[in-house]
Amino acid sequence: MKWQLAWTFLLIYAAAAVCGCRATLPAQGTSSSAIEAPVTGPFAVQELQQFTALDPIDTHTHVYQNAPELIALLERLNLHILDIVVARDPDQKSLDVERRQVSDFVNNSHGHATMCTTFDPFLYREPSFKKTAIAEIDGDFNHGAAAVKIWKNIGEQVKDPKGNYLMPDDPVFEPIYKEISDRDKTLIAHVADPNTIWEPPTPKAADYEYYMHHPEWYMYKKANAPSKAAILVARDHVLEMNPKLRVVGAHLGSMEADFKQLADHLDRYPNFAVDIAARMPYVVMLPRADAIAFIEKYQDRLIYATDHSLAAEAKAQDAVKQWESSYAFDWRFLATSDLLQYRDHQVQGLALPPAVLHKLYHDNALHWIPGVITAQR
Ligand SMILES: [Zn+2]
């Protein structure tokens, strides 16, 4: 099977993938001249029944606003979400604010949201780092947090004064990883990014503008920056050093461009699973039979997720519409054989067996992130 994706696809799709936003991308598939009209829009009544019957869980979202509209959507879709805190910058105050926003939403979500916490990696050289980080995550565990996230700033941004980049397998993190596994929680690892950010600027690439405006993530231009391969090796080292630690690699473990590499990792590391957040287009791009074969083979290791967000200042109504139509698209792609539209291309849904769908949408989330569904408050 051809797991390796064509280079051109990577260029086209990278921008959405990098931004962490959902991609609305062209995909290969059936001819656009098909007579049948593609299915679009929010869930129809019968579709909604089938979707809600899965007890769906989305294990990768970022909600920083206590929006009743969103809670109403989660109730209507019978959907549970993991709401993830991210340490975005060296300002501890912004992390505290984000933690509070997530906690507020979780507490008001009628049991539909659970927290994934984090710690501040920018403080890693402080003598109190280990103690503070463990106290913070323990505090959140005690209030129901089910997981801890590490983000791509480890490997791509945080450095010592000599310019050496902090890597995911730095010994400074080991006590934290141990605490996570001792507490029977899960590490969600978003490390590295799509390949294009390590490569020369390509004005034709869809992400070109993004990197011109966000040079902080353009690794190609950074002196002494680790390669993507080096960051993934460091991530793998964490898996090897902590065989009892459950690790969910966000965004297909950043191996979206090479499903063979992803398969090899899933074969090699029994403590590793991946979410498909913001990487569904890469699955859509696979030849249909290959996509079905891959998902069926790794049906216990793939977790449905989106990377949907609701920023503190965003309009909740707009977000809710966007969330619902993307849940509907993803479900149709995975569960039905409907003809679907991605820009000017049409693709056919995978029509996965119900047992596999139930694993992707529900069982795997519970298995890999126990506590992702909390009791109703
Ligand atoms: Zn995310």
Image (cartoon, grey):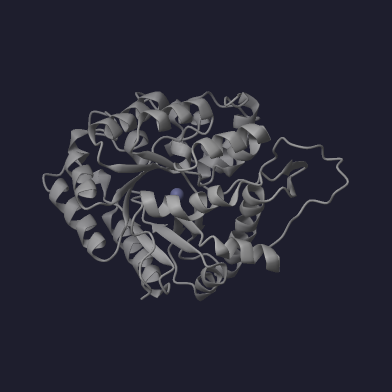
Q: Is residue 245 visible to us here?
A: yes
Q: Residue 173's spot in the image, x, y percent?
A: 21, 40
Identify whether 267 is placed above or below 77.
above
In this view, the residue in front, 259 or 128, is 259
Residue occupying the far left of the picture: 127
Identify whether 3 is placed above or below 373.
above
In this view, the residue in front, 311 or 291, is 291
Q: Residue 195's spot in the image, x, y percent?
A: 50, 29
Residue at point 20% right, 58% down?
A: 138
Is residue 237 found left or right of 35 in the rendered image? left
**In the rendered view of the protein, which quadrant contains the C terminus?**
bottom left
In this view, the residue in front, 321 or 109, is 109
Residue at point 85% right, 49% down?
A: 36
Q: Residue 272's spot in the image, x, y percent?
A: 37, 38
Is residue 110 found left or right of 304 in the rendered image? left
Q: Is residue 43 visible to us here?
A: no
Is residue 235 found left or right of 314 in the rendered image? left
Count of numbered labels shown in the rendering = 0
Residue at point 44% right, 71% down?
A: 66
Identify whether 51 is placed above or below 187.
below
The quadrant in which residue 163 appears is top left
Identify whether 100 is placed above or below 120.
below
**In the rendered view of the protein, which quadrant contains the N terminus?**
top right
Q: Residue 9's spot in the image, x, y percent?
A: 64, 30
